[in-house]
Amino acid sequence: MTTTAQPTDQTPTTWPPNVTARFLTRVGIHLRDLNATVDVTDTADRTIATCWPCGWTTDHGTAYRHQVLEKAQQHADGCTALPNPNA
């Protein structure tokens, strides 16, 4: 029998300012932790992706936002870092 982890009723944290996209990490899916995310933040001239469980980050100018989104999704698909419960 194959089972797929489904998010629980856990309420994710409020999105920080300027976060325009959020990807649930592999460990977040497995643990049903809606706060284990890679967040994409847009500023006036940069698009920055940050993984909260492991600290991975990438950024580029806003003209290449699509590349940051692709990298963020790829990272989230494979990240198995556990979020720091004390952070």
Image (cartoon, rainbow, N blue to C red):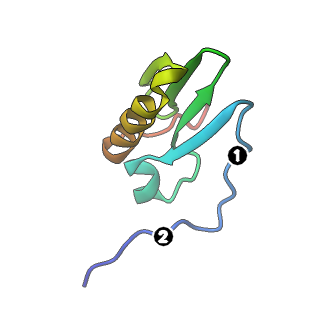
Reply above or below: 52 against 4. above
Residue visible at 63% across and 38% down?
20
Residue visible at 74% across and 44% down?
14
Q: Residue 66 sits in which quadrant? A: top left
The quarter of the image holding the C terminus is top right
Q: Residues within 10 Å of mark 1 (few under 14, many from 20)?
A: few
Where's residue 44, x and y in %?
67, 17
Reply above or below: 36 against 30. above
Question: Distance between the Cα atoms at labels 2 and 1?
Answer: 18 Å
Reply above or below: 2 against 80. below
Q: Residue furthest front?
A: 63
Q: Of the residues shown, which amino acid type is indicated by label 2?
A: Gln
- 55 left or right of 71? right
Residue at label 1? 13
Residue visible at 27% across and 79% down?
2
The quarter of the image holding the N terminus is bottom left
Where's residue 46, x and y in %?
57, 17
Q: Of residues 30 and 57, which is closer to you in this image?
A: 57
Residue at label 2? 6
- 20 left or right of 3? right
Q: Residues within 10 Å of mark 2 (few under 14, many from 20)?
A: few
Residue visible at 40% across and 49% down?
27
Q: Of the residues shown, which amino acid type is indicated by label 1?
A: Thr
